[in-house]
Image (cartoon, rainbow, N blue to C red):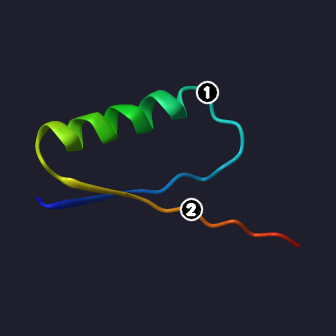
Amino acid sequence: MKNIAVLTSGGDSPGMNSAIRAVARTCAHYDIKCTGIAEDIQD
């Protein structure tokens, strides 16, 4: 595995910051590219 993308549903979700941090740190440890996907939708 060379790439991981992180996609969240947005809004309030307890523990999501910790989960994203864990994914990013694990990717850094194993030299895997980690991509965060953000979409800012405004009405």
Q: Position of residue 13 (x, y in %)?
A: 63, 35
The quadrant of the rendering that contains the N terminus is bottom left
Q: Secondary structure at mark 1?
A: loop
What number of labels is visible?
2
Q: Is residue 6 left or right of residue 16?
A: left
Disc 2 packing (10 Å; few <14; some 14–19; many ≥20): few
Work out whether mark 1 precedes mark 2 in sequence or the reverse, and give the earlier one.
Answer: 1
Question: Which of the 4 quarters of the picture holds residue 41?
Answer: bottom right
What quarter of the picture does the C terminus occupy?
bottom right
Residue at screen point 82% across, 69% down: 42
The residue that appears at 21% across and 41% down in the rendered structure is 28
Q: Write down the quadrant of residue 15 in the picture.
A: top right
What mark, if any, has residue 14 been given in the picture?
A: 1
Under mark 2, the amino acid is Ala
Q: Residue 20: x and y, percent?
A: 43, 39
Q: Amino acid at mark 1?
A: Pro
In this rendering, would 1 be left or right of 3? left
Residue 30: x %, y % from top left: 11, 42
Q: Give the residue at mark 2.
A: 38
